[in-house]
Image (spheres, rainbow, N blue to C red):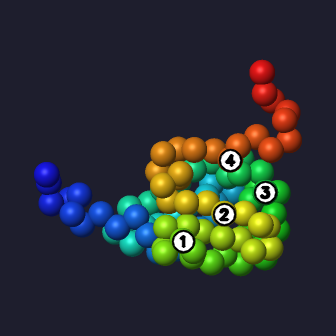
């Protein structure tokens, strides 16, 4: 086992947005960047709603109270977009 694994800390440090991406900085310095379109509630939200986020789940989650949206670092690291909640686009 390498020493890097021992120093991994997947807890949320900060959350940022670009025009088309959600960027989450982890406590260990890694950065996760995913397409904002993966999360329709976030993609259509106002800047004020996006900036109102809280760390949850012992540091491993992000909650947007104005949007009723929750994401985990585990899901983001896995590359898991939000499930299709409207039923559109399914086969």
Q: CA distance from mark 1 to mark 3?
A: 20 Å
Q: Secondary structure at mark 3?
A: helix
Q: Is residue 12 visible?
A: no
Q: Nearer the viewer, mark 1 or mark 4?
A: 1
Q: Nearer the viewer, residue 64 or 15?
A: 64
Q: Of the two numbered discs 1 and 3 on the same chain, state the one appearing first in sequence.
A: 3
Which residue is at 52% across, 64% downward? 24
First in sequence: mark 2 vs mark 1: 1
Q: Position of residue 54 (x, y in %)?
A: 62, 78
Is residue 81 shown above or below 51? above
Looking at the image, residue 10 lies above or below residue 36: below
Which one is nearer the viewer's eye here, 32 or 55?
55
Depth order, front residue of 30/53: 53
Report the disc number at residue 80.
Answer: none
Residue 56 visible from this viewpoint? yes
Q: Which residue is mark 2?
A: 70
Name the residue beneath numbered marker 4. Answer: 82
**Mark closer to the observer (1, 3):** 1
Q: Earlier in the sequence, mark 1 or mark 4?
A: 1
Comparing labels 3 and 2, the label whose residue is closer to the camera: 2
Measure how far apart labels 3 and 4 are at the Cα level.
9 Å
Residues at badges 3 and 4 in contact (C-beta under 8 Å)? yes
Q: Are marks 2 and 1 in contact (CB under 8 Å)?
A: yes
Determine contact: label 1, label 4, CB under 8 Å. Answer: no
Q: Position of residue 36 (x, y in %)?
A: 68, 52
Q: Which residue is mark 1?
A: 57
Q: Quadrant of the C terminus?
A: top right
What residue appears at the point 39 percent right and 72 percent down from the top-left corner? 27
Indicate which disc residue 41 carries.
3
């Amino acid at each position: 086992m390498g020493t890097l694994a021992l120093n991994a800390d997947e807890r949320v440090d900060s959350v940022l947005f670009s025009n088309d991406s959600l960027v989450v900085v982890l406590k260990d310095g890694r950065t996760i960047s995913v397409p904002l379109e993966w999360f329709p509630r976030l993609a259509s939200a106002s800047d004020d709603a996006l900036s109102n986020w809280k760390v949850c789940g012992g540091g491993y989650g992000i909650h947007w109270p104005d949007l009723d949206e929750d994401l985990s670092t585990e899901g983001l690291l896995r590359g898991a977009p939000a499930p299709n909640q409207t039923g559109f686009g399914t086969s």
